[in-house]
Image: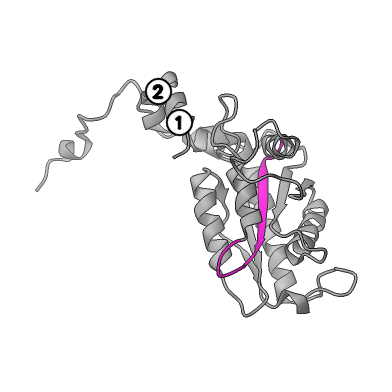
Amino acid sequence: MRKESALTDTPNIDESHFQAISLERLAAPSNELRPPRILLLYGSLRDRSYSRLMTEEAARILTRLGAETRTFCPSGLPLPDDAEASHPKVQELRDLVTWSEGMVWCSPERHGAMTGIMKTQIDWIPLSLGGVRPTQGKTLAVMQVSGGSQSFNAVNQLRILGRWMRLLTIPNQSSTPKAFHEFNEAGRMKPSPFYDRVVDVMEELMKFTVLTRDNKDHLVDRYSERKESAAELSARVNQAAI
C-alpha cells in the first residue's frame, strides 16, 4: 500500500506561488447588481443578413432579461494587418470588447466554416491590450445560421476561438438551419424550437455572466503565470504574430 504522504509530495511546485483554492471566495454572492454588459458580434454584411437578424433577436431577449447590450457592425472593418490598430473601426471594436462582461458570437456557416467577416473581428481582438487581457474570464455564447441542413461546424470553430481567447464559453449553443424559413418579411424570427433555443442560450449566458463576473480574475488566475515574472509574461503575450 502506498503511503499517504506520497500523494502530497510535489517537489516541483514553487510554494511561494502555489495557492489553495478559496472556497469562500468562490461561494461568495455577486457584489454587483447592475445589468450585465453584453457585446454581440455577427458575421455577414448582406442586406438581409440572418446572422445579424438572429443577433438582433438575441439582443432583444437579453434586454428583457436585464442586460445592457451593444452590437458591433463589422462594415468597414479592415482585414487584420491591412491597417493600423488605430483605425477607427478597430478602436470601436476593442473599446466594446473592453466594455463588455460577456459576448455573443453569431456566424453564418459558409463553405463548412465560419465566415471571414466573423474571423476578422475576432482576429482584431488582442490577447493583451495595455497590460490587460480584454477577453480573459468573460463569458461567451456561440450561435450560427445555415442555408441548408443543421450543422455545428461554425459553432464548434467559435468554441475553439473562445477557448483560445480565454473566454468562459457556456455549454449551450444555437444552430438554426435553413434560416431563410425562420424569419418573416419584417426580419423577425418566427416562433419555433429554434427560437426557443436562442432564448435558452441567452438565459444561460446571463446566469453565467452574473455568476462569474465578480470572480473572473480569481477563476482564471494561474499558478504558472504567478510564477512567471510580469516582464516575461508581457513579452510572451505580446510577441509578434507568427
The percent coordinates of residue 99 (x first, y second) are 71, 35
Callout in the foreground (1, 2): 1
Which circle marks residue 57 in the picture?
Answer: none
Residue situated in front as seen by the camera: 156 or 201: 156
User: Mark 1: which secondary structure?
Assistant: loop
Q: What segment is highlighted magenta in the picture?
A: 99-114
Q: Quadrant of residue 217?
A: top right
Which residue is tagged 2? 232
On screen, residue 57 above or below 9 = below
Other-residue count near label 2 (Cα within 10 Å), few / some / many at <14 / 14–19 / ≥20: few
The percent coordinates of residue 82 (x first, y second) are 62, 41
Q: Please name the amino acid that badge 1 sits on.
A: Gln
The percent coordinates of residue 188 (x first, y second) are 85, 68
On screen, residue 134 above or below 79 = above
Residue situated in front as seen by the camera: 42 or 67: 42
Residue situated in front as seen by the camera: 106 or 121: 121
- Image quadrant occupied by the C terminus: top left
Residue 113 counted in the magenta span: yes
On screen, residue 227 above or below 242 = above
User: Mark 2: which secondary structure?
Assistant: helix
Q: Quadrant of residue 10?
A: top left
Drawn side of residue 143 relative to residue 61, left or right: left
For marks 1 and 2, the one nearer the N-term is 2
Determine the residue located farthest toward the front in the rendered image. Answer: 82
Which residue is tagged 1? 239
Residue situated in front as seen by the camera: 87 or 50: 87
Drawn side of residue 119 relative to residue 237, left or right: right
How many dots with numbers? 2
Determine the residue located farthest toward the right in the rendered image. Answer: 186
